[in-house]
Image (cartoon, rainbow, N blue to C red):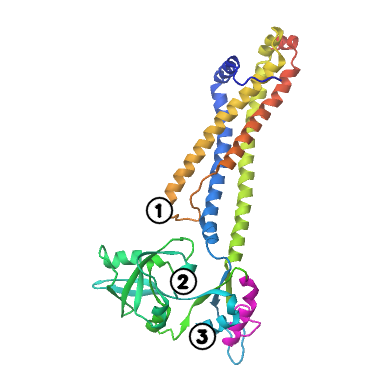
Amino acid sequence: MNIKIFDSDLWHEVVVTVSQQKMRSLMTMFGVFWGIFMLILLVGCGFGFGNGIIGQLTSLDSNTFFLFPENTTMPYQGYDRDRTWKFKNSDIGLLKAKLADRLDNIMQVNADNDIEVKHDITSSSYSVLGITPNYIKVVPQRIVAGRYINQIDVEQHRKVCLLGTNVAKVLFADDTPLGQHVSVAGVMHTVVGVIKRTNDNIQLGGDPTESVVLPITTEQDVMNRHNEFDFMSLTNLPQYPIEDDEERIVSAMKEEHHIAPDDENAVYVFSLKSALAGFLGIQLGINILIWIIGIGTLAAGLIGIANIMIVTIKERTQEIGVRRALGAQPSKIIQQIMMESLTLTLTAGIAGIVAGVWCLYGLDSLMSGSDGSSMTLIKHPMISIVPTLAALVILIAGGLLAGYFPTQRALKVKAIEALREE
């Protein structure tokens, strides 16, 4: 069949036929519009989910896990069950010796909530974090002003601190906090830097933007922690998977703190690799569900197009008979019907794509803060060219199929029978 896409007479006939049934055409097109609109919107949100917490997790070193002390669940060596315990500074040296040259990074953190922080007559309660300098490698942050905590601060128990941007704004208003002093739990500290978080979905111990950060040793002195800390993270070099060392690390901590070797709940281990694998599995499931729902909704619209074309053929039986009697080629009739179907489908589909992209743009603007960071698990929802082209291909194929089956009825209509149709 020789199809002339740019045949002006053909397009005139298509436009006239479609415009004669405006309400029917609009209602039929709405099904396709809604299907492609929902597909674009869902695929864009799925992409945004990947950019959100998953994208931020992938920016971290997945060869890392975190250790948290939990209450014991078994009596051991004279200690009762349900005993509370903490990590000690000496544990760091022990683990460095155990892992030797396999270890890339080890971090300690203490977190205290609702601690009074004061400057002049302004005071408020904030979280106070005690950290080691490599905390910034695990929890992404940006140094807005000044410097970060360094190893000398830790070794010399210096009374210095970092302020989160929100803390600095409250305590100092428009004044610069660098070099000035704040009271943390009644002890004066010099402000050496201002920081803010750059990853909304990763927080360990507290939000750096809303916290006061001290060297771990200084925080232990101020809070009477006696060389204790709340949790740690360990990162191996890339060639040494951290999960290979998990058992001996946990065993070393149990032995050091007199915990039963069989007590599986006393040391909680959180693996970034496992968390990332879990979220990737969720994302895959979401994407599959999105395409099933989107294509199903779109298919319903295309079926509506097919049904309306069948009705159209039925109503135009006499017209087809007259055209056949006057010498119109069957291919011309088939071509017109398929082009009518394709016109309805593509018009509605392109409108749905434009509306979907526009809504994604609005959604991105709505969920983004003034600093451009997303406030939800979805970040920068958008749709790339590949799924958009895939949707267009589905539309074209579906539109042609929606017109193909009614053309089979048109082919079976004989001119003499068509002229007798009431």
Q: Check the image and report above or below for 300 versus 422.
A: below
In this rendering, position of residue 382 left or right of residue 148 = right
Give residue 398's position: percent from left, percent from top.
65, 32
Q: Identify the element where label 3 is drawn.
A: helix
| Amino acid type indicated by mark 2 | Tyr
C-alpha span from label 1 to label 2 = 25 Å
| Amino acid type indicated by mark 3 | Ser
Give residue 325's position: percent from left, percent from top.
71, 8
Residue 75 is inside the magenta segment: no
> Is 415 or 238 nearer to us in this picture?
238
Q: Check the image and report above or below for 328 versus 309.
A: above
| In contact (CB < 8 Å): disc 1 and disc 3 | no
Residue where numbered disc 3 is placed: 90
Residue where numbered disc 2 is placed: 135
- Work out which residue is located at the far left of the displayed protein and give it: 121
How many marks the image carries: the answer is: 3
Which of the two discs, 1 and 2, sits closer to the camera?
2
Residue where numbered disc 1 is placed: 369
Q: Earlier in the sequence, mark 2 or mark 3?
A: 3
Residue drawn 39% across the image and 70% down it: 148
Give residue 376's position: percent from left, percent from top.
47, 55
Q: Identify the element where label 2 is drawn.
A: helix
Residue drawn 54% across the image and 46% down it: 44
Quarter of the image with the N terminus in it: top right
Q: What stretch is highlighted in magenta?
A: 240-265
Q: Earlier in the sequence, mark 1 or mark 2?
A: 2
Question: Label 3: few (<14), some or many (≥20) within 10 Å?
Answer: few
Question: Label 2: few (<14), some or many (≥20) within 10 Å?
Answer: many
